[in-house]
Image (cartoon, rainbow, N blue to C red):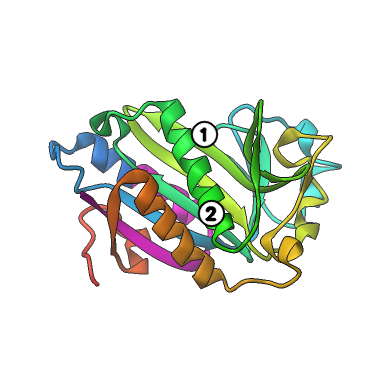
Amino acid sequence: METVRCLRARDVEYGVALAWQHATADALRASSNDLLADEAVALIEHTPVYTMGARGGRATVRGAVAELPAPLVDTDRGGDITWHGPGQLTMYPILHLRRRGVGAGEYLAGLEGMLLDTLAAFGIEASLVEGRRGVWVGNDKIAAIGIRIQGGVSNHGVALNVAPDLGWFAPIVPCGLEDAGVTSMARVLGAAPDLDTVADAMRAAFERRFDCVFVDAPADALRTPVGMAVSG
C-alpha cells in the first residue's frame, strides 16, 4: 500500500494552493520513482475566491465581474465557475494516475465515491446525477468536482460544502447550471458539523478508495512543495 503526503491548512489564498499544485505535479511527472512516493494531497479551507474553469465564460457571472464580492481567478481545471472559501473543504490530490494504471473515468468515479462515503459517514444520503458532475442532494449540489490530468498526473480536485455562507453563490451561476441549486452539510443536517471531523472522514474515505495511507506533512509545505519534510 502506497503512502501519500497529506497537508491540512486554513485561510489559504487560492494562488498559493494553485502554485503548490503545479509545482508538486511538475515534480511528480519528472520523478523516476516508480513507487509513487512523491504523490501528495492537500486539504484546504480557502479565503474567499471565485474560480473559472477552462470551459467557462463570463456569462455565468450575474452582473459585472468587478462587483463580485471576492476575486475571480481563471484556472485550467474542467468545469465552469464556482466559489471557494470559509466553511468549504477543498481537496487537491496530486497523483500519478498513469503509474497507478488508473484512467480518467476511474479516477473521477473514485472521487465521487469518496465524497459519497464522506457524506454517508454523517448520515447524508447523497447521489450522482447522470450527465452532471459532482455530488447532489436532490436538485442541489453539495460537492463539486473539477480536475485536470496532464502527463498522467492529476491536479485540482473536489470542493465539499460543509458549512459555508451559501450567499456567496448568489452572484454566479454555480457550475453554469441555471436549473440547479447549491446546498451544504449544515443545511441538510440542520447544524454545522466540525470541519476537522469532516476532513478526517474525507481522509479515511480517500485512503479506502485509492488504496493508500496518508502521512502528515506540515502546512508550510504549501510554500515549499518540492522535497518537503514529512512529520507525524
User: Per the image, is 4 magenta?
Assistant: yes
Q: Which residue is mark 1?
A: 76
User: Per the image, is 211 magenta?
Assistant: no
State the residue at coordinates (32%, 29%).
Answer: 152
- Amino acid type at image mark 1: Asp
State the residue at coordinates (50%, 71%).
Answer: 196
Q: Earlier in the sequence, mark 2 or mark 1?
A: 2
Bounds of the magenta span?
A: 1-23
- x%, y% of residue 189? 72, 66
- Amino acid type at image mark 2: Tyr
Q: Looking at this view, is 169 or 202 the one in front?
A: 202
State the residue at coordinates (46%, 56%).
Answer: 16
Q: Which residue is mark 2?
A: 14
117 is higher (above) or lower (below) than 32: below
State the residue at coordinates (68%, 44%).
Answer: 136
- x%, y% of residue 81? 68, 39
